[in-house]
Amino acid sequence: MTDQAAPPGTAAEPATKPADDLWATIDDLWTWLDTDQPIGGKEGVLLRMLKLSEEVGEVAEAVIGATGQNPRKGVTHTWEDVQGELCDVVITALVALRTLTPDTREVFTRHLAGVRERSLRSAAREVRSTR
């Protein structure tokens, strides 16, 4: 064996990283995009945010395709396609957040905790009021 790293997807190096590496992967994607972006500065940041709308549109297209709602096209997608498009939205949003702050994990975790607190507190109040 040589000291060279094995190609991705081989037994020596899995094709995917564990979920623990989510934030490292977001940083890697951000670095890759930032290194080769054709338009930088404020305009580049705005375009990065706009990419999120494009991805959400792809979710809509996949849902329409999975349900056959376009009579001209019929069923063109699967629910697995929808899942993949939703993953693209999440990845794009996290990369967009990383574009705005290097503290992506902390900002997201703090915000998620706030949403969880508000939502579950509200849900608990509703349950108590119906008893």
Image: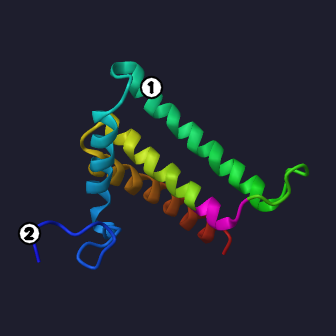
Of residue 83 and residue 74, the one placed in the foreground of this image is 74
Dot label at residue 46? 1
Q: Coloured how?
A: rainbow
Which residue sits at x=28%, y=79%?
Answer: 11
Residue 78 on the magenta segment: yes
Corner quadrant of residue 95:
top left
Quarter of the image for residue 18 reads bottom left
Tag of residue 3 = 2
What kind of element bears circle 2? loop
Give the structural element (helix, strand or loop) at label 1.
helix
**Looking at numbered disc 2 in the image, what kind of residue is underneath it?**
Asp
Q: In the rendered picture of this protein, how many numbered marks are placed on residues?
A: 2
Q: Amino acid at mark 1?
A: Leu
> Alpha carbon of mark 2 to alpha carbon of mark 1: how far?
42 Å
Across and down, in percent, residue 61 comes to 71, 49
Q: Earlier in the sequence, mark 2 or mark 1?
A: 2
Number of residues whose C-alpha sits closer than 10 Å to that of mark 1, classed few (under 14), some (14–19) or many (20 or more):
few
Q: Quadrant of residue 67?
A: bottom right
Left or right of 76: which side holds 119?
left
Q: Residue at x 70, y 65 (%)?
A: 78
The residue positioned farthest toward the right in the image shown: 71
**Is 87 positioned to the left or the right of 25 in the image?**
right
> Residue placed farthest to the front in the image?
1
| Residue 57 vertical placement versus 116 (above, below) | above
- Residue extending farthest to the left is 3
92 w.r.t. 40: above or below:
below
Q: Left or right? Give the position of 77 relative to 36.
A: right
**x then y, percent, for residue 34:** 30, 34
Over which residues does the magenta segment extend?
A: 77-83
